[in-house]
Image (tube, helix red, strand yellow):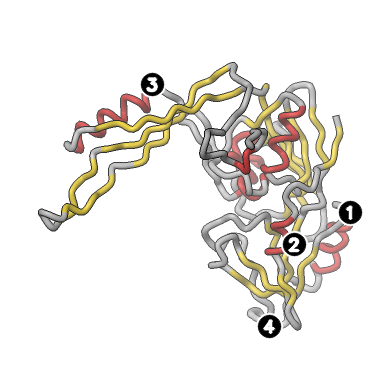
Amino acid sequence: MLGLKLSLHTAFLSLLAVNSAQAYRWFNWQFDMTCEATGYFVPANESELVQFVKYHHPRKTMIKPVGNGHGFGNLTTCISAGEVEGRESYVLSLTNLNSIEIHDDYTVTFGSGWDLVDLIPELHKNGLQTQNLGSEMVQNFVGAATTGTHGTGKQHGNIGSTILGARILDAKGEIHEYTKDDEDMLKAYRVAIGSLGIITELTIQAEPLSYLKRTTKVLETPTNITELYVTIQEYADKYEQVNIFGPNLDWDYNKKTLVPKTNVTLMYFEETNYTAVQNCSTDYCSNECGRCHRN
C-alpha cells in the first residue's frame, strides 16, 4: 500500500530556519543549541537532493540534515557559515521525502520526512504499530532512531533496533541500499548520528496493533532505601513497562532539614482489549486529546 504523509506536523518547520540578512539561523527545540548556516534547503524529492549534494561536493560545502531538533546536545547543530574559511554551510530538511509502503510481512518502508506524530496514526489506520517508542511523538523517526533514542520496556531494544533496511546518499551524491542481508552495515546506520551519509529511506519491522492500559498508584513506601529498592524491583519484575516518580525530599520546618518523602508514584502498563476513549480523564487529556472527546 502506498501513501503520502499528511501535513500534521509542519508548523514546527518554521522554527528550523529564521531568515536573517545573509544566513539562516537554526535552533533546536529548547533554543539552547543554534547555528547560522549559509542557507536552508528543502528538496522536493530524492532526485533533487542528489543533485544538490553532487553540486556541493566539489565545493566542500558542509551539509547538516536535521529532523525536528529534539536532541539535547549538538548532534544536529550545523557548522556556522564562516567558521571554516572558504566553505559554505547548509541546513537540510527532508520533510518532503514522505512516501510510504506497507508490506504483507508487517514491514514498512518510508521516506525520511516522516515524523512520529504522523507515522503513528498512519500505521494505526493499517492495523499496525511500531515495535517500540520513546516518550515523545514530536521527533522525526530517522532522527530519533539514528541518535540512539531508547525505547520503553525492559525487553525492547532502542528505536533503531527495528531498522531492517536503509537507503543512503553519500557525500558524492551516490545512492547505496542496504537490506537485512547487510547486517554489519545496518548496525552502523541504526545509530549513525548523522556521520555516515544522508538516510533518505528506511524499512522497519512493525507489528499488529495492540493496546495498553496504564494504571497509576501512589505507594506509601518504606523510608529505608534498601527496602524501597526491593519494592521497586518487585514491580519492575512483574510488569514490562514501569514508570516510577520518587522518592523526593521535603523540607521539614521543625527540624530545619530535608527529609525523605515516602510517597512514590508508580505507573505500569498492561495489554488490554479496551479500545474506547484513551488517555483521557475528567480533568486531563494527553496528546491534545488524541481521539478523545470532551465537552
Residue at numbered disc 1: 47
Amino acid type of disc 2?
Leu
Q: Quadrant of residue 2?
A: top right
Q: What amino acid is labelled 4 in the image?
A: Glu
The disc label shown at residue 224, or none: none
Three-letter amino acid code at the position of disc 3: Lys
The residue carrying mark 2 is 92
The residue beneath circle 4 is 85
Report which residue position mark 3 lands on.
238
Q: Quadrant of the C terminus?
A: top right
Q: Which residue occupies the foreground of this view, 210 or 141? A: 210
Image quarter where the N terminus lies is top right
Q: CA distance from mark 2 to mark 4?
A: 21 Å
Tag in front: 3 or 4: 3
Identify which residue, 238 or 37, lies in the foreground: 238
Residue 88: in sight, yes or no?
no
Eyeballing the image, is 246 above or below 105? below
The type of residue carrying mark 1 is: Ser
Q: CA distance from mark 2 to mark 3?
A: 45 Å
How far is mark 1 from mark 3, CA to CA? 50 Å
Say what secondary structure mark 1 lies in: helix
Label 2 to label 1: alpha-carbon separation: 14 Å
Image coords of residue 166 (percent x, y): 73, 41
> In terms of secondary structure, where does tag 3 sit?
helix
Is 259 left, or right, of 147 in this rendering?
left
